[in-house]
Each structure stands twice: as C-alpha cells, then as structure tokens.
Image (spheres, helix red, strand yellow):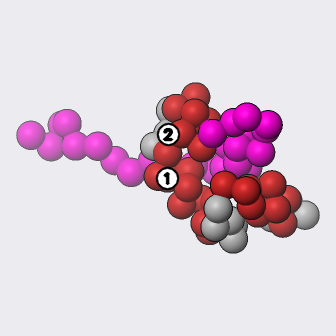
C-alpha cells in the first residue's frame, strides 16, 4: 500500500521565478500558467502571495521585487 504514496514535490527558486515571470506576460492567467507548467493554480497563487502580491494587478511588482 505504501508503493502508491505520493511524495511532496520541491521546486527550485529558478523554476518558481520562471513560473512567476510567465504570470507577468500580457494576457496570462495564473490558472493558465499553472496548467502549462503542470502545477496547481493555488500553489502558484501561494508563491505570488509569498512575494507580496495580493491581487492579479500586482503580479509584475511582486515578481520584480525579488529578482534583484
């Protein structure tokens, strides 16, 4: 029965930045980006909130803040 247990995936910081950069693209939705990367949209939103993004309009600001 333990053979089918899923393990928690860990994503690297560069991968997260790539996903969040894709969210900044014009016309991109968080759900669409998450689907394209094989992720859950709630996880991507959690990464955005962790970078200080509270609304979809603030995505560019939150992603740029942590690039430096």
46 or 30: which is nearer to us?
30
Q: Which residue is mark 2?
A: 39
Tell me the magenta residue range: 1-29
Packing grade of label 1 (10 A; few <14, some 14-19, many >=20) is: few
- For this orientation, the residue located farthest to the left is 1
Secondary structure state at the residue bearing disc 2: loop
Mark identifier at residue 43:
1
Identity of the residue drawn at 68% across and 65% down: 53
Identity of the residue drawn at 69% across and 36% down: 28
On-image quarter of the N terminus: top left
Image coordinates for residue 38, horizontal then vertical, percent: 50, 32
Image coordinates for residue 24, horizontal then vertical, percent: 77, 45
4 or 46: which is nearer to us?
46
Quarter-of-image position of residue 57: bottom right
Residue 28 against residue 56 in the figure, above or below: above
Residue 52 against residue 63 in the figure, above or below: below
- For this orientation, the residue located farthest to the top is 36
Quarter-of-image position of residue 15: top right
Q: In the displayed structure, does residue 54 sit left or right of residue 64?
A: left
Q: Can residue 18 be seen from the camera position used here?
A: no
Packing grade of label 2 (10 A; few <14, some 14-19, many >=20) is: some
On-image quarter of the C terminus: bottom right
Q: Find out whether residue 49 is within the magenta segment.
A: no
Residue 4 against residue 20 in the figure, above or below: above
Identity of the residue drawn at 70% across and 48% down: 20
Image coordinates for residue 42, horizontal then vertical, percent: 47, 52
Residue 68 against residue 21 in the figure, above or below: below
Secondary structure state at the residue bearing disc 1: helix
Q: Can residue 40 be seen from the camera position used here?
A: yes
Contact flag, marks 1 and 2 (Cβ < 8 Å): yes
Q: Find out whether residue 6 is within the magenta segment.
A: yes
Identity of the residue drawn at 54% across and 60% down: 46
């Amino acid at each position: 029965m333990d053979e089918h247990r899923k393990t928690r995936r860990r994503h690297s910081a560069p991968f997260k930045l790539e996903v969040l950069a894709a969210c900044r693209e014009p016309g991109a939705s968080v759900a669409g980006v998450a689907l394209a990367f094989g992720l859950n949209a709630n996880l991507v939103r959690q990464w955005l909130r962790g970078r200080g993004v509270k609304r979809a309009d603030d995505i560019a600001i939150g992603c740029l803040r942590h690039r430096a």
